[in-house]
């Protein structure tokens, strides 16, 4: 018989080349709040936590000896962190001023959000979105189908 344990929380866990610098960037760019960090004697950060509103993102430096690597410079990561905010444009401007690269400017999307993408200086992509239209899943699907079949 299979037993399923209840999930209490889900955390994004980012590997970065310089966790201390990443925490500074995330604080300035997105208003993150550092909760704590664990530093090994060599100075590498083995674990840190940053709060973004109600969510926590975990971070660590690279530990290649354990197969834990940060994104390589210039390479896109296959995942992103989505911050749902009150004002997409304002957060994107703040992130850009802090040193982030806007890879998609704020744009109204078919799914009812104004959204943008920002690449942080450590190679991770952040999707920044704010709701500009309350839609049902059915309306989103209708719009998505229309978008994908037009051309």
Image (spheres, helix red, strand yellow):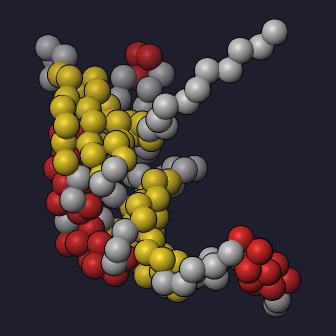
140 sits to left or right of 41: right
**Quarter-of-image position of residue 92:** bottom left
Farthest-out residue, top: 1
Q: Residue furthest bottom?
A: 151
- Residue at 26% of width from left, 43% of height from top? 50
Quadrant where the C terminus sits is bottom right
Q: Residue at x 17, y 60 (%)?
A: 28
Task: Report x, y in % for residue 45.
Answer: 23, 27
Front-most of residues 90 and 85 = 85
Residue 129 x/y as whole percent: 45, 71
In which quarter of the view is residue 90 placed?
bottom left
State which quarter of the image contains the N terminus: top right
Query: Is 36 on the left-hand or right-hand side of 84?
Result: left
| Relative horizontal placement of residue 43, taking residue 144 as reference (left or right) | left
Total marks placed: 0
91 or 21, which is in the foreground? 91
Q: Which residue is rendered at x = 14% and y = 14% of the image?
A: 41
**Residue 121, x across and y down, in percent:** 30, 55
Q: Is residue 80 visible?
A: yes
């Amino acid at each position: 018989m299979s037993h399923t344990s209840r999930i209490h929380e889900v955390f994004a866990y980012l590997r970065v080349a310089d966790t201390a610098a990443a925490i500074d960037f995330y604080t300035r760019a997105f208003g993150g709040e550092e909760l704590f960090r664990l530093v090994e004697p060599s100075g590498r950060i083995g674990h840190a936590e940053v709060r973004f509103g109600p969510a926590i993102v975990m971070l660590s430096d690279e530990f290649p000896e354990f197969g834990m690597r940060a994104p390589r410079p210039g390479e896109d990561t296959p995942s992103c962190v989505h911050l749902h905010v009150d004002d997409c444009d304002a957060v994107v401007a703040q992130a850009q001023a802090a040193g982030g690269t806007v890879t998609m400017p704020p744009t109204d999307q078919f799914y009812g959000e104004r959204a943008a993408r920002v690449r942080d200086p450590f190679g991770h992509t952040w999707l920044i979105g704010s709701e500009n239209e309350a839609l049902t899943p059915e309306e989103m699907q209708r719009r998505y189908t229309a978008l994908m079949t037009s051309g």
